Image (tube, rainbow, N blue to C red):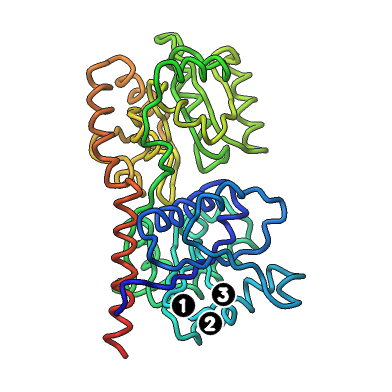
């Protein structure tokens, strides 16, 4: 077996998604490009017509972007991704094809290369009330096909592995767990002058509790606002919320109105480059989500040396480690007490910060990339053993 692999990636979200799945795809590809340059990497994606990710492309030195071929591929990206991509990948004589975000193109089981798919979560099955009926039906069909057609399934945490077995009936021996990383920009400490400049440009308060993530019901931000209202008279801290949303954001603003907390709760929109500096100046990171695939903002906070309060169960103990604080997301008083315990005890906060940085090293991109490469080689060994 060669030590140089030809690996294809269904990489639509690397070029067309600015949030979690897109970040996962870009970080994984950048990790392989940096730490495993010997492997040939083929990135299959619909055209990036807005040229949003040229900076991402410019960082890649050992990857080839493969746009749609043929008449139908060029006029319909969905047809190309679903029905034509398998043939294009077969022509490229891959060793492995990796669907990075739940999906594999149809008829891929007929191709000679090995097939891998990453499943991030099955939240649409665990919490169906958060998703429209038609979306759940489409997701289930795609996820069921990809796990069945693949040779191996990558779950991003043990919780997702258990859900794949439970909801999709995938054999346990077919599933491997491979943790993801956050962007390397979170590994570096900002200088005091850099922090001061950021605080001025974003009008950050001197002391604040931080939340980063989407503004949606599953994230449970209303409970965070309720909990902050219980603490507002005990501490001078503000609550800083970073994210995007529509209808749920309206509910958040209405609740802020109800408590008359406009001077203490701020919604800001830092750039990706500014976000590490926002984390590093927070006294506490609060993330009371009901359920996550992995919870990358938790890992970003740990790398930033920021104490974490998050929810119990789900994937949270895997991403947060033994020294974060875990609360019942259904109990506002539980969340408020955990936040109070960190804000009032500086020694406790310092201990959580130091142990969190140490725990986060397992998610360093060098380590997650090494684990991923070992996984690819194990997939290829299975191929040679079976042939």
Sequence-first tag of 3 and 2:
2
Q: Is residue 324 visible?
A: yes
Q: Which of the two residues, 25 or 264, is positioned nearer the viewer here?
A: 25
Q: Secondary structure at mark 1?
A: loop
Q: Quadrant of the N terminus?
A: bottom left
What residue is at 43 percent from the left and 52 percent from the top? 293
Occupied quadrant, residue 337? top left
In x, y percent, where is residue 128? 54, 56
Sequence-first tag of 1 and 3:
1
Q: Secondary structure at mark 2?
A: helix
Q: Is residue 137 visible?
A: no
Kindly identify which residue carries mark 1.
Answer: 94
Kindly identify which residue carries mark 3.
Answer: 105
Q: Which of the two residues, 269 or 96, is positioned nearer the viewer here?
A: 96
Kindly identify which residue carries mark 2.
Answer: 90
Determine whether 16 is above or below 203 in the image: below
In x, y percent, where is residue 97? 47, 73
**Front of the two marks 1 and 3:** 1
Q: Are marks 1 and 3 in contact (CB under 8 Å)?
A: no
Q: Are marks 1 and 2 in contact (CB under 8 Å)?
A: yes
Determine whether 284 is above or below 31 in the image: above
What residue is at 22 percent from the left and 25 percent from the top? 351
Q: Distance of mark 3 from mark 2, alpha carbons?
A: 12 Å
């Amino acid at each position: 077996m060669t030590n140089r692999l030809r690996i294809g990636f269904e990489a639509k979200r690397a070029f067309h998604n600015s949030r979690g799945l897109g970040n996962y795809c870009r970080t994984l590809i950048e990790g392989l490009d940096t730490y495993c340059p010997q492997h040939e990497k083929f990135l299959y994606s619909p055209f990036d017509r807005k040229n949003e990710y040229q900076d991402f492309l410019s960082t890649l030195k050992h990857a080839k972007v493969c746009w749609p071929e043929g008449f139908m591929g060029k006029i319909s990206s969905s047809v190309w991704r679903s029905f034509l991509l398998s043939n294009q990948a077969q022509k490229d004589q891959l060793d492995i094809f990796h669907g990075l975000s739940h999906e594999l193109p149809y008829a891929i089981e007929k191709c000679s290369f090995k097939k891998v798919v990453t499943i991030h979560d099955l939240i649409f099955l665990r919490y169906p009330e958060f998703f429209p009926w038609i979306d759940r039906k489409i997701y289930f069909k795609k996820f069921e096909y990809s796990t069945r057609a693949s040779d191996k399934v990558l779950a991003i945490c043990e919780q997702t592995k258990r859900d794949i077995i439970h909801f999709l009936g995938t054999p346990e021996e077919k599933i491997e767990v491979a943790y993801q990383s956050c962007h390397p920009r979170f590994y570096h400490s900002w200088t005091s002058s850099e922090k001061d400049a950021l605080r001025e440009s974003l009008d950050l308060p001197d002391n604040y509790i931080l939340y980063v993530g989407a503004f949606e019901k599953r994230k449970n931000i209303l409970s965070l606002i309720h909990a902050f209202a219980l603490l507002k008279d005990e501490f001078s801290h503000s609550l800083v919320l970073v994210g995007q949303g529509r209808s749920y954001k309206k509910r958040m603003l209405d609740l802020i109105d109800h408590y008359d907390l406009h001077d203490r709760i701020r919604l800001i929109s830092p750039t990706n480059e500014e976000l590490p500096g926002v984390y590093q100046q927070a006294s506490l990171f609060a993330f009371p989500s009901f359920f996550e695939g992995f919870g990358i903002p938790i890992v970003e906070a740990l790398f930033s040396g920021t104490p974490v309060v998050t929810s119990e169960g789900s994937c949270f103990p895997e991403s947060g480690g033994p020294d974060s604080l875990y609360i019942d997301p259904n109990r506002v008083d539980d969340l408020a007490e955990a936040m109070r315990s960190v804000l009032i005890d500086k020694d406790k906060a310092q201990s959580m910060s130091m142990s969190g940085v140490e725990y986060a090293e397992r998610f360093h991109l060098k380590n997650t990339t090494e684990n991923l490469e070992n996984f690819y080689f194990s997939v290829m060994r299975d191929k040679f053993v079976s042939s």
